[in-house]
Amino acid sequence: MEETLRKLFEDAKNELKSADNMKTLEELRIKYLGKKGELTKILRGMGSLSPEERPIVGKLSNEIRSEIENMLTSRKDDILKKEKEKKIKSEYIDITLPGNRIDIGHKHPMTKVLDEIKEIFLGLGFSIAEGPEVELDYYNFEALNTPPDHPARDLQDTFYITKNILLRTQTSPVQVRTMEKNKPPIKVISPGRVYRSDEIDATHSPVFNQIEGLAVDEGITMGDLKGVLNLFAKRLFGSNTKTKFRPHYFPFTEPSAEMDVSCFVCGGEGCRVCGYSGWIEILGSGMVHPNVLRMSGIDPEKYSGFAFGMGLDRITMLSYGIDDLRLLYENDLRFIKQF
Ligand code: DAH
C-alpha cells in the first residue's frame, strides 16, 4: 500500500508539473484529493492493514496530501502570474508608434477668400443677407432701374425660365429684397451664386459667384462708399494697397464707379497679373439710384445709400495667381490640395 501511495505521489507530481492552466489544475485537484479521488480510494483500503502498518500509512498519506496541496498552491500562483503577464503584454500600447493618418480636407480657395471678405464686413457692422437664385425678372432687372427695353439688359445674357422668372444674373436683387423688408439703417453684404448664358472658357462660366454690398441711412455720401471700400481693399490685399475710383455706368447707381486696387503682385510697377498697368479692377459701385430706393419703399428725399458688387471667382483667381477659372470648378484634387 505504501508503494501505491508513493506511485500516486509520483504521478501527481508529474501531472502537476505539466499543468499550465487553472482548468487542468482544478481537474487534477479533484482527481487526486477529491472525495472520490485517488487518495481517498487508496485510504478506503486501510481497513485491511495490520494495526502496526496503519499509522505508518496514515502518516504517509497525510504527508502526501499536504505535499500535493502545496504543489497545487504553488502551481496555481505560477499560472496566475503567467496569465497576468500575458494579459499585461497583450494590453500594452506603444504610444510611440506612428498612428494611422486620417486625411482631412480643407476649405476650397474660394471659400477661404469668401470667409476673409465676410470677416472684414462683419467687423464693419454689416450683416449677411440672402436671396433666391431663381428670381423674378422684377427683382433682377425692373426694380433695379432696368426696365424691359433697357439697353443694359443686353450686357447680361440671361437664362430665362419663364417670361417673368429667371436665374439671377447678379446678386443685386438682394438689395431690393432687403430694402423691402427692412427700415434704414441697413448695412448688408450678400454673397451668392449667379448665372449667365456664357460659354465656358478661362474667364467665363455660366455659374459664378458675386458678393453684393448695400448701406442705406440718412446722410450717406460717396465719401462713405470710398472710405468703406478703401478700408476693405487694405484689409484684403494688404495695408499698402491703394485704390482708384473710375467713373462707370450701372443702371441702379448714380453716380457709379469702378474701383481698382494697386497691383498686389508687383505693388503697382506693372506685371503680368495687372496687365502691366499697375492696377487691377476689383468691383463696381455707386450711390443707390433714387428710383431703386423709391421702388423698394424707401424715401429718397430722406435716405441715401451706396452699393457695390464684386466677383468672388475673379478675386480668388487674382489672390492666388490662378489663371484659369475652370480650375475653381473642376475640383481636381491635385489642384485643390495646393491651397
Ligand atoms: N451687379 C453688377 C454686375 O453684376 C455689379 C454691381 C455694380 C453691383 C455696382 C452693385 C453696384 O451693387 O453698385 O456687374
Image (cartoon, helix red, strand yellow):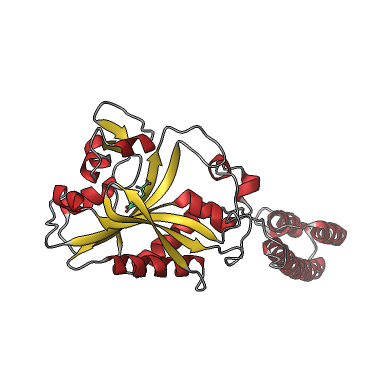
Q: Identify the image quadrant of the N terminus.
A: bottom right
User: Residue 253 placed where, x, y %?
Assistant: 28, 52
Q: Identify the image quadrant of the C terminus.
A: bottom right
What residue is shown at x 32% (from left), y 29% (from top)?
160
User: Residue 88 placed where, x, y %?
Assistant: 69, 66
Residue 50 in the image: above or below residue 142: below
User: Residue 116 placed where, x, y %?
Assistant: 45, 62
Can residue 90 be seen at all in this image of the molecule?
Answer: yes
What residue is shown at x 60% (from left), y 63% (from top)?
265
- Find residue 3 and report its image quarter: bottom right
Q: Closest to the observer: 48 or 158? A: 158
What residue is shown at x 67% (from left), y 63% (from top)?
91
Can residue 214 be seen at all in this image of the molecule?
Answer: no
- Residue at the bottom extreme of this rendering: 239
User: Residue 38 placed where, x, y %?
Assistant: 74, 54
Relative side of 238 to 193, left or right: right
What residue is shown at x 46% (from left), y 33% (from top)?
198
